[in-house]
Image (cartoon, helix red, strand yellow):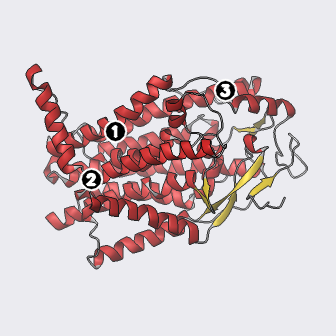
Amino acid sequence: MASSKDGLRKRNDKGHANENGKTGGPTDEGRKIDQRLDQHLEYEFGGPWGVLSIMTGFPILMYYLWICLVFYDGQLTFPSSVEDIFPFFGRMWEHVRVDASPNLYAWKVYGGLMIFQLALAWVVPGYMQEGLPVPSLGYKTLMYKCNALGCLYITWATAAALHYFHIFRLTEIIDNFGHLMSVAMIVGFSVAFGMYFLTVATGNQIRMSGNFIYDVFMGACLNPRIGPIDLKMWLEVRIPWVLVFFMAVSGACKQYEQYGYVTPNMAFMCLATWLYLNACGKGEECIPQTWDMFHEKWGFLVIFWNFAGVPFSYIYSVVYMASHEPSKYQFSIPTYIALFATLLTAYYIWDTSMSQKSRFKMQTQGITTFRNTFPQLPGGTLQNPKFIQTAHGNRLLIDGWWAYSRKPNYVADWIMSLSWGLCIGTASPIPYFYSVFFIAVLIHRVGRDFERCGVKYGKDWDKYCSIVKYKFIPGIY
């Protein structure tokens, strides 16, 4: 099963488990179902008008929440009267114009990060991981260069050196939040539209609806690449979660400079963001097994959110703490213990459940050797896992965490997002945006996923649902 010059691998075409116990591919009936699913069937997100509302509404919402967080004591602000409506919008615009202008400094910082991360992704050695068979590529598989962890170590060391020698002070990140956010939004829009036009011009579009704005939102290309870099996987980790982590570190540095210490709340966010970023790096070989790589196209939905949405709307608690006195969000010692315990427990379930599912998929492909990166938590790999063999040719895992819930990773992921708001208590409602938005996203994704699985697996999906009864929390939902 050697790699071809285009980086693709051709797998066994038989849709059943072979003598080595691996699944070679879907059955003939499975291929017909895949062909149906690999085309535009219906509009999602409210269709063209819905996605247009999202594309215009989310940037406005991000500006509004940031303004409330920094300039209105973390409280939602509204016009005081009918007469105040136009002056209110004038004040909002003035905040954006003055404190969130896409200035040259922000372009240097954000653009520098992008160029640095692209260069590292290109040159740093990495672990080569085979992805899942892609129906649109004739069930060939793509090879992914997984070097995020090495790139992250280099990035952390570089940032520490730049800060120590006063070349680039990390406090400048949080101080220029608004300016950086505007640049990130411009980059997100530009890349989304640019990729759409480039993909259509080169004839590589897939699963198109025929509506321009909807196709820009959902994307036209499935596997965009520059040399050895898979852009979709690169963007999922190297920009959003790197920025999220350094936002937290920036907030901690600012607190230390102001007060001579870092609050437990800010330390919590540094730990939480490091855990997430490090998990993405140390388990990068699991990403090619996910829905995002296998099926989701690279459009505005993914591009804008990773360039701008994640780093500039998930981290509101840090922005609040960096601009407010610690007395506003102090807890008792037992509360801090409970907060950290909740984070670490949720992280363990999230990390190991993701690892169980991804490595199970690798095992069905005959891959039995896995990376040994830090930290490898106990229970991340299932030995002789239980599963349902489907008529489609795929297998459905019913073991480990996945014996109790169809989406245990979503539950744990959401609890972590909630803790990112809980770390400031009731001081402001805005840091809870992440968890509120995230649960809406997860419920929507589950609906899309389960509907697709119902079509793909038919009676086998009904059997699976009868065994794994709960979507999220065992015994509840």
The answer to the question of whether label 1 and label 2 lie on touching residues, with beta carbons closer than 8 A, is no
Q: Residues within 10 Å of mark 2 (few under 14, many from 20)?
A: many
Furthest toward the top, the residue is 82
Q: Residues within 10 Å of mark 3 (few under 14, many from 20)?
A: some
* Horizontal side, residue 425 vs residue 26: left or right: left
Q: Is residue 221 above or below residue 463?
A: below
Q: Nearer the viewer, residue 286 or 32?
A: 32
The residue located at (47%, 43%) in the rendering is: 413
The tag earlier along the polypeptide, 3 or 1, is 1
The residue located at (24%, 43%) in the rendering is: 66
Q: Inspect the image, locate mark 2, and give the three-letter code of the amino acid beneath it.
A: His
Q: Residues within 10 Å of mark 1 (few under 14, many from 20)?
A: some
The tag earlier along the polypeptide, 1 or 2, is 1
Q: Position of residue 362 (x, y in %)?
A: 72, 52
Q: Nearer the viewer, residue 350 or 167?
A: 167
Mark 1 lies on residue: 59
Q: Inspect the image, locate mark 1, and give the three-letter code of the amino acid beneath it.
A: Pro
Q: Inspect the image, locate mark 3, and give the three-letter code of the amino acid beneath it.
A: Cys
Mark 2 lies on residue: 179
The residue located at (81%, 38%) in the rendering is: 26
* Horizontal side, residue 240 vs residue 392: left or right: left
Determine if residue 32 is in view.
yes
Q: Which mark is residue 465?
A: 3
Identify the element where label 1 is drawn.
helix
